[in-house]
Amino acid sequence: MNPQWESLRTLQPPPEAHVLWVEVNEEGVHFLDAAFGAWDDLVNVRREYKSEGGRTLFKIFVAPGCLDEALGVLDRARKFIPIGEIRVER
């Protein structure tokens, strides 16, 4: 490593993002993407999904330290779209 960057070795890596799996349909994913778009860098709604027993869960990345805020938004979104299980992976 270039000596001028040696001090970077002492820095701690940033915390990992939280991973949520949210049971919602395709239309709901679009709604959540638009709703979370109001906050810069809070959430990244992915089109990655997994099927479990006939249910579809979509992956959402939440910025470190923003989990409670994201869960609150999801709770309020239930007034507008059907949201089932919300699973916090990490």
Image (tube, rainbow, N blue to C red):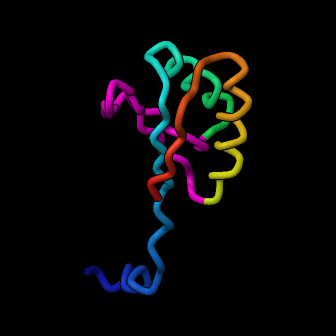
- The quarter of the picture where residue 54 lies is top left
> Which sits in the foreground, 58 or 45?
58
In this picture, residue 7 sits left or right of residue 32 = left
Total labels: the figure holds 0
- The quarter of the picture where residue 35 lies is top right
Query: Which span of residues is magenta-colored?
Result: 41-64
Q: Main secondary structure of the magenta part?
A: strand
> Which sits in the foreground, 26 or 43?
26
Residue at the front extreme, as displayed: 53
> Which sits in the foreground, 87 or 69?
87
Residue drawn where x is 46% and y is 50% of the image: 19
The relative height of residue 43 versus residue 11 in the rendered view (above or below) is above
The relative height of residue 40 versus residue 38 in the rendered view (above or below) is below
Residue at the left extreme, as displayed: 1
Image location of residue 84, percent across then percent down: 54, 30
Image location of residue 7, percent across then percent down: 43, 85
In this picture, residue 8 sits left or right of residue 83 = left
Residue drawn where x is 44% and y is 72% of the image: 13
Specify whether residue 15 is painted magenta.
no
Specify whether residue 54 is painted magenta.
yes
**Quadrant of the image containing the N terminus:** bottom left
Image location of residue 82, percent across then percent down: 59, 20
> Which sits in the foreground, 13 or 51?
51
Image location of residue 61, percent across then percent down: 48, 45
Residue drawn where x is 54% and y is 25% of the image: 33
